Amino acid sequence: MLKDIFRDLKKKFDTAIGVFRKEKIIIDPEDPAAVSHYAKVMKTAREKAGLLSESQRIQYTIEEETKDIPDARTYLLQLQEIRIKRNLPDELGVEAMMMDTLEKVEKEIKKPLMRNDKKGMALLMAEFDKINTKLGVRREDLPKYEEELELKIAKAQLEELKKDAVEAMETQRKREEFKEEKPVDVRSLDIRNFL
């Protein structure tokens, strides 16, 4: 069984590397075209290897860690814990608004809200929809938000690649046999040569 798991992981890894070997990736996190291209390559590699995107991983984590939670309050607290663990910011203060809304609904129904209480949950979801409207968040825009997230991740990964490449070149230039070499522009490196 362990052998099969390893074989499956190796197959996914080889598939992803195969995609990277075919694509020239420019290590320039400041160039929107380079970031977009890198994000597309990452998406293609993920899809061919059968891996989840960041938003899909978050969704999977939420489903797995909350499936046995019976009440809405514990559910929201678990969402907050997941967000903190994954270093996701709550820039708009949505968690506090959601908790306030939950308290309002619980006061209205005069008991703790259970997730299987269809009427109470419908009331809570209607209130959440009001918050989303107030914040300008629409369900139909979710694919756009997912794409923005993927671009942010791609940019962060390119920044990390650039930092590592510059650091490696600086270390190399300190060695005696490379002191005469001209510095190389990171954008000119072809990542396929390092796979």
Image (cartoon, helix red, strand yellow):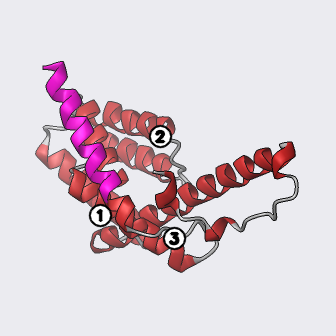
Q: Is residue 2 above or below residue 185?
A: above
Which residue is label 1 attached to? 44
Q: Are marks 2 and 3 in contact (CB under 8 Å)?
A: no
The numbered mark at residue 35 is 3
Q: What label sits on residue 3 in the rendered view?
A: none
Report the amino acid beneath label 2.
Arg
User: Cα distance, mark 1 to mark 3?
Assistant: 14 Å
Q: Secondary structure at mark 2?
A: loop
- Image coords of residue 16 (percent x, y): 31, 52
Region of the chain picked out in magenta, as a range: 1-18
Amino acid type for the residue under numbered disc 1: Thr
Residue under the image location 33 percent in, 57 percent down: 128
* Front label number (2 vs 3): 3
Residue 171 shown left or right of residue 135 in the figure: right
Q: List the residue tagged with mark 2.
A: 86
Which quadrant of the rendered structure holds the N terminus?
top left
Mark 2 / mark 3, whichever is N-terminal = 3
Q: Amino acid at mark 3?
A: Val
* Marker count (numbered): 3
